[in-house]
């Protein structure tokens, strides 16, 4: 992380576009915020747009705004995120999910530093630093024609690659001690970890990266048998059914109904777990669960899940 902090220090004060790359949970959002707070724009807004969370048909209006009457439901003028980010930074998260048509528009905006609202003619100057992030393999997306090469080069002025946690295990003890003191304070505890636990945390592979580590340390602090939370996790990876605390079925229903209910509950739990893990990034969740975006939205509605 120190190497990355040095780069952040070097580039923060320039207005260059930055592309942040790395697996889910490595700390891309944190790095984007750090660039903003160390830049001359620190007193301006930091506007985060999750390109995967906006329905494709609404992305243009969300980014660039629209004029009254631009489309049927456009009852009044609406500013876009680029305008809200004036004098600050716009952070385009999950940039690989931007629809191709919008990639073309974004490219033009980044070249001319001007844009117009949907349904409007007035040219508006961009006064925002652009930071983009993705956990996708962009080069692969290029070869598949899913991401425009010219936009890739335009965004990639400075590329910051944040390595997965398993490739920087020396960060783990520092992160753990930081999280421990934060959560101890937050929950009024005095939890300490044994050297054995710390060693095991350091050796673990952390496919969910810092986010997963943070969650485990939080559980260790909050739960009285907290260290078992990690043991359960490590064991769960080997056998996902061994550790789940399942409510015993109430036998007042037919076997078929029990099976249905079990399936529904399992589906709901899986949905919730994945959505939390990907911070309600629905496109990502659909990928993880290997269902279409539409199916995922239906399931979310069916299970009556709502974002935190
Ligand atoms: N170096 C760090 N120090 C302290 N906390 C960190 C660090 N890196 C990441 N975190 C924490 O880990 C969690 C995940 O970080 P973040 O949201 O920045 O990941 P991300 O790379 O944007 O993930 P995603 O691709 O899923 O959006 C956050 O709660 C963040 O505060
Ligand atoms: Mg993120």
Image (spheres, grey):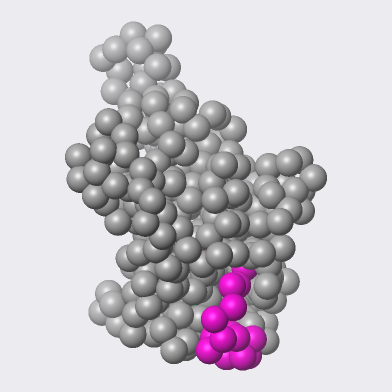
Q: Is 300 situated above or below 166?
A: above
Q: Residue furthest front?
A: 121
- For residue 145, which quarter of the picture? top right
Q: Is residue 186 visible?
A: yes
State the residue at coordinates (32%, 39%): 70
Asked if residue 15 is among those painted magenta in the image, a careful observer would answer yes
Q: Position of residue 136 (x, y in %)?
A: 65, 53
Residue 13 placement (x, y as % from top left): 53, 89
Please report the bounds of the magenta region as a residue range. Answer: 6-19
- Position of residue 39 relative to residue 28, above or below, is below
Tell me the residue at 54%/29% (across/down).
Answer: 292
Q: Position of residue 288 (x, y in %)?
A: 58, 41
Q: Who's the residue at 44% across and 68% down the image? A: 126
Give coordinates of residue 303: x percent, y percent: 33, 30
Q: Is residue 28 above or below residue 59?
A: below
Pick the front one: 215 or 248: 215
Q: Taking 8 as reference, is 298 above or below it?
A: above
* Lateral position of residue 174 relative to residue 65, left or right: right
Please report the residue visible at 45 percent of the width from the left and 58 percent of the height from the top. Answer: 115
Nearest the eye: 175 or 14: 14
Would residue 150 be counted in the magenta stretch?
no
Image quadrant in which you'd find residue 124: bottom left
**Most foreground residue, 50 or 215:** 50
């Amino acid at each position: 992380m120190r190497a990355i902090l040095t780069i952040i220090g070097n580039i923060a004060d320039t207005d260059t576009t930055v592309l942040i790359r790395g697996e889910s949970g490595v700390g891309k959002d944190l790095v984007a915020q750090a660039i903003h707070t160390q830049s001359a724009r620190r007193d301006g807004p930091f506007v985060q747009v999750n390109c995967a969370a906006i329905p494709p048909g609404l992305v243009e209006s969300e980014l660039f705004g629209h004029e009254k009457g631009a489309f049927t439901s456009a009852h009044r003028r609406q500013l876009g995120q680029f305008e809200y980010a004036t004098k600050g930074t716009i952070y385009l998260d999950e940039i690989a999910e931007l629809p191709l048509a919008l990639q073309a528009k974004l490219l033009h905006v980044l070249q001319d530093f001007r844009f117009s609202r949907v349904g409007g003619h007035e040219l508006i100057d961009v006064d925002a630093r652009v930071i983009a992030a993705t956990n996708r393999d962009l080069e692969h997306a290029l070869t598949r024609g899913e991401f425009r090469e010219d936009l890739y080069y335009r965004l990639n002025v400075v590329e910051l690659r944040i390595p997965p946690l398993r490739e920087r295990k020396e960060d783990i003890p520092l992160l753990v001690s930081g999280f421990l003191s934060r959560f101890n304070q937050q929950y009024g505890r005095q939890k300490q970890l044994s050297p054995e636990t710390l060693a095991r945390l350091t050796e673990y592979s952390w496919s969910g990266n810092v986010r997963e580590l943070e969650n485990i340390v939080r559980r260790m602090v909050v739960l009285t048998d907290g260290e078992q939370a990690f043991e359960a996790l490590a064991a769960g990876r080997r056998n996902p059914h061994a550790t789940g605390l399942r409510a015993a079925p109430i036998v007042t229903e037919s076997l078929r109904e029990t099976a249905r209910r079990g399936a529904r509950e399992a589906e709901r739990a899986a949905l919730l777990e994945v959505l939390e893990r990907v911070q309600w990034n629905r496109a990502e969740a659909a990928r993880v669960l290997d269902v279409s975006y539409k199916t995922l939205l239906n399931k979310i509605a069916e299970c009556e899940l709502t974002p935190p």
